[in-house]
Amino acid sequence: MSKLLEVKLLADKEVIIETVSRMGIANTKKKILFPSCYLFEQDNKYYLCHFKEMFLVTRNNGYNNISEEDIVRRNAIAFCLKNWGLIDVEVSEIEPHNKFIFVLPYDEKDSWYINHKFNYKRVVIN
């Protein structure tokens, strides 16, 4: 299992959750966005997790097919959030990258379909 990326929130949690929901892989022709990451809270700590990591931490039988590219994408999203002043994270944890991250502008959100690979609202941690 990959090491979870712990982050410190510098903005309202709901703002970060909403922002992350507009970052990921997009089909611009069909206006479909596939968010890559979610904010995960456990034991009063926050983690930015790729959706595949979310399957691992929230399900006993989560599949483990996280690729290096998935982690690079997660780290690129963390890099953006850090630059925007929304989170703080150790820079050494999000090594330099050249990964393009699609960010859906907030004012265009209603004209796109956001297709979540993970149902964030149903997360229950034992």
Image (cartoon, rainbow, N blue to C red):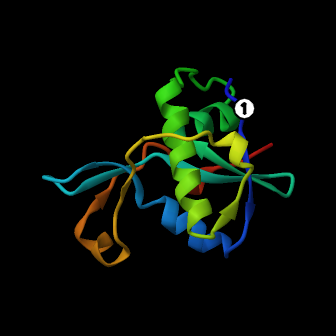
In the image, is residue 108 above or below residue 60? below
Residue sitting at x 59%, y 67%: 16
Horizontal side of 53 relative to 18 (left or right) equals right
Secondary structure under tag 1 reads loop
Q: Residue furthest left?
A: 29
Q: Position of residue 21 (x, y in %)?
A: 46, 59
In the image, is residue 113 above or below residue 63? below
Badge 1 crowding class, 10 Å Cα cut-off, few under 14, some 14 to 19, many 20 or more, is few
Q: Position of residue 10 (x, y in %)?
A: 71, 71
As rendered, which of 37 and 74 lies closer to the eye?
74
- Quadrant position of residue 96: top right
Q: Position of residue 101 (x, y in %)?
A: 39, 50
Residue type of the residue flagged with mark 1: Lys
Residue sitting at x 50%, y 66%: 19
* Residue 119 in view, yes or no: no
Q: Quadrant of the N terminus?
A: top right
Residue linked to disc 1:
3
Count the marks: 1
Residue sitting at x 51%, y 46%: 76
In the image, is residue 40 above or below residue 62? below
Q: Quadrant of the C terminus?
A: top right
* Residue 4 in view, yes or no: yes
Q: Position of residue 5 (x, y in %)?
A: 70, 43
As rendered, which of 113 and 46 lies closer to the eye?
46
Q: Residue furthest bottom?
A: 107
Horizontal side of 80 relative to 58 (left or right) equals left
As rendered, which of 21 and 100 lies closer to the eye?
100
Horizontal side of 111 relative to 74 (left or right) equals left
- Quadrant position of residue 84: bottom right
